[in-house]
Structure formats: C-alpha cells, structure tokens
Image: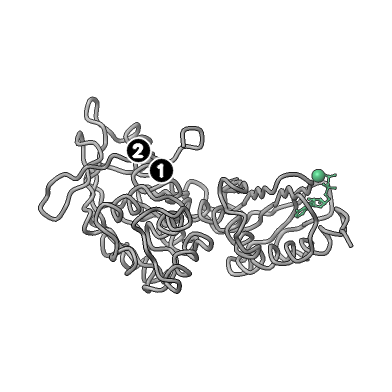
C-alpha cells in the first residue's frame, strides 16, 4: 500500500512539540526564543549522489541530514530549538521512511530540538533541513573575530573508536571509490563508514566556547578551505593593511584515528587538511585562554587540540616536525568545480 502525502507526514513526522508554541499542521510553525536571545538560523541540503551514496542506511541518512545542520548551530555557539524538513522523495516507502524518521528523531532528542514543519513532495531524493537555535544577543560565535597571535584549535572525539576523527570521512569515501593502494580491513571500514555517515555535531562544545573563542567554523569542506574562510573574514576586520591574516599549522599536532595513522604520510595529510565532511569545530582563542579552552573541552566531553596559531603576512602555511614548510596542493571543495 502506498502512502499519501498527508498520511506520510502524520505517520512519520508529526510529533507533539513541547517547547515551541506550534508545530506541524498549520501554515506556519511558531517559535518563542527566550527573552534577550537572538535566533540563529541555518539551512543545509543533502542531495543523493552528491552528499550521500544510495547505499546509505535510511536511519543514517536521517541522522546526517540533521547532524550537518546542528553542526552549523554548534559553530555559532547556539542552543538548538527547532527545525523544519523539506523532503523530496521518489516513492513513499514505509521501511525507508521509518528508518529515516528513526535516525532523525534519535539525534533530535539527543539535542533537544523539535521538528516543527516542512514540506513533502515527490521527486529525486533530497533532504533540506533548516535549523533554528538561540544565542544571547551579540554573543554568537562568528568567523570574523580571529586575531594575529591567537591559538588555532580543532575538536576531536575522546576515544579511538568514536566517529569524528579528522579525515576519516574522506578516507571512507576513498575506500568506496576503490582508490588504489588503500586497504582497510572490514571491521575498521565499518568505523570509517560511521565517520562519513554519522557525524557528531559538537553542539555542547560550541556553547562552551561562547565568550572564549574569537572565531569558530565547522569543518565541512576540509580544514584548509574552511580555515581560509576564517582568515579572509577575520582579516577584513583585524588584519593590517598589506599584511593579511595568515596561519601556521603544525602537521604533527593534527589529531588522527589509529586508522589514519596507518596510512602513508601523503594520504594522511590530504585527508586531514582537505578531506571534508568532518563536522569538527575549528576555532581560535587568545593564548591567555589556553587553559579555559581545555576546560571547555572537558566540560563538554569533547577533545580539543591546539594545531597552530594565527600570523600576519605569512599566508596559510603547514609545517612538519622540523619546521619545514610542507606542500599542500589541494583546493577546497567547490560544488561547481569538483
Ligand atoms: P502548505 O500547504 O501550507 O504548504 P503542506 O500541506 O505542505 O502545507 O503541509 C502540511 C503541514 O505539514 C504543514 O504544517 C507543514 O509544515 C507540515 N509538513 C509537511 N511536510 C513535512 C515534513 N516533511 N516534515 C515535517 N512537517 C511537514
Ligand atoms: Mg507545503
């Protein structure tokens, strides 16, 4: 039996809301941010064949669609409130929809965010989520606050077998693509695949970094590419004339999973610096706040590692253990150039 549009919404997506004054079922949902707070809003779309492979399990797809959006709230230091889901589906298949909803709501419940509305249409498989969060007015973490001398940090999982290690999602993609010379045993591959399919948005860390980090971004297109966004936006505010903001990254300080450590140096560097789909937070903070950043990591049960510092005039350079500059010939991911 095939489901109609409204049965489908009622069965899989309409859940009572607790915090929002009005959820699914009317022409608009209603949100009530707390007094003194600003709304933080972000949209991210997942397109089959572009952002995920057709082989992904539906619950993981539901998880990832929300996770990449929560990651944007994390990067702003926002507390999640509500989200909408615009869904385009080739067919209304019960097992697929049940799995999708399961993965979606499991993550939503973990971060106390409610589904308040959306749109459903038939068409190529495509999920577009918009998230709404709240931050104290003027307190959002931005890309534009980094200063020369700031320390550069990246988040990471606390344990070897947790998903989220930098570059692992890219390594998984390379295995799927059948890249020559890449051999990963079955059990290890499942762990890599989890990194690609189940990113862990660093929502608690983002909030703990408010008032502490000078700039924050989540790594979605690769560390170097995303860092260059920060340098550009921060440089426009805090750079000196003729001496643009730069960064010096210590390659040996980059956190990595045991599987990553087993790869050859060139592959490690490419996955770590230009991988993408990581959803860890990359942030800067004044050196005087070093201990406070470590404490923020502990309080949010998230690993944080210093990986370099910001400079003036030097561009973005990556150095090895001997201080020699390493070649980093990769471009940041671009949908219209890839
Ligand atoms: P409208 O005609 O106003 O566009 P729809 O008929 O598209 O409304 O949707 C009916 C209700 O169901 C609306 O409240 C809408 O927000 C909600 N809705 C539609 N699709 C979804 C979905 N995929 N997830 C959550 N809510 C949805
Ligand atoms: Mg509609």
Q: Secondary structure at mark 2?
A: helix
* Residue 40 screen position, x and y as percent: 57, 48
- Residue 155 in view: no
Relative horizontal placement of residue 322, taking residue 24 as reference (left or right): left
Is ligand 1 within 8 Å of the beta carbon of the residue shown at mark 1? no
Q: For the N terminus, give its image quadrant.
A: bottom right
Whether 228 is drawn above or below 86: the answer is above
Asked if disc 2 and disc 1 are in contact, CB closer than 8 Å, the reply is yes
Q: Residue furthest top?
A: 242
The residue that appears at 79% across and 64% down in the rendered structure is: 94
Q: How would you rate the neighbour count of disc 1 (Cα within 10 Å): few for under 14, some for 14-19, many for 20 or more?
A: many
The residue that appears at 60% across and 55% down in the rendered structure is: 65
Ligand 2 rendered quadrant = top right
* Residue 48 screen position, x and y as percent: 62, 48
The residue that appears at 45% across and 71% down in the rendered structure is: 186
Disc on the earlier residue, 2 or 1: 1
Mark 1 highlights which residue?
143
Mark 2 highlights which residue?
234
The residue that appears at 23% across and 49% down in the rendered structure is: 249
Q: CA distance from mark 2 to mark 1?
A: 6 Å
């Amino acid at each position: 039996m095939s489901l109609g549009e409204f049965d489908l919404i009622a069965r899989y997506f309409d859940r009572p809301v607790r915090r929002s004054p009005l959820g699914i079922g009317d022409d608009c949902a209603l949100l009530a941010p707390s007094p003194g707070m600003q709304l933080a809003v972000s949209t991210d779309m997942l397109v089959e064949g572009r952002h995920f492979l057709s082989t992904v399990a539906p619950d993981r797809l539901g998880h990832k669609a929300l996770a990449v959006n929560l990651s944007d709230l994390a990067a702003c230091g926002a507390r999640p409130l509500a989200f909408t889901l615009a869904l385009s589906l080739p067919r209304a298949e019960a097992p697929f929809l049940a799995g999708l909803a399961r993965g979606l709501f499991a993550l939503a419940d973990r971060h106390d965010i409610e589904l308040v509305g959306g749109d459903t249409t038939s068409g190529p498989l495509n999920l577009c989520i918009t998230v709404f969060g709240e931050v104290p007015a003027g307190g959002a973490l931005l890309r534009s606050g980094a200063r020369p001398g700031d320390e550069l940090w990246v988040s990471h999982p606390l344990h070897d077998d947790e998903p989220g290690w930098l570059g692992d999602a890219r390594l998984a993609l390379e295995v799927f693509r059948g890249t020559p010379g890449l051999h990963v045993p079955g059990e290890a591959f499942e762990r890599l695949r989890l990194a690609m399919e189940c990113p862990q948005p660093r929502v608690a860390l983002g909030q703990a970094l408010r008032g502490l980090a000078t700039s924050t971004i989540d790594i979605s297109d690769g560390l170097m590419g995303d860092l260059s966004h920060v340098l550009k936006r921060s440089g426009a505010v805090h750079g000196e004339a003729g001496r643009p903001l730069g960064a010096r990254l210590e390659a040996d300080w980059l956190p990595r999973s045991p599987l990553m450590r087993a790869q050859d140096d060139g592959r490690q560097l490419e996955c770590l610096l230009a991988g993408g789909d990581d959803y860890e937070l990359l942030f800067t903070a004044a050196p005087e706040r070093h201990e406070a950043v470590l404490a923020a990591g502990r309080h949010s049960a998230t690993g944080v590692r210093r990986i370099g510092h910001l400079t003036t005039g030097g561009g973005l350079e990556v150095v090895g253990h001997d201080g020699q500059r390493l070649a980093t010939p990769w471009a940041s991911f671009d949908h219209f150039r890839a």
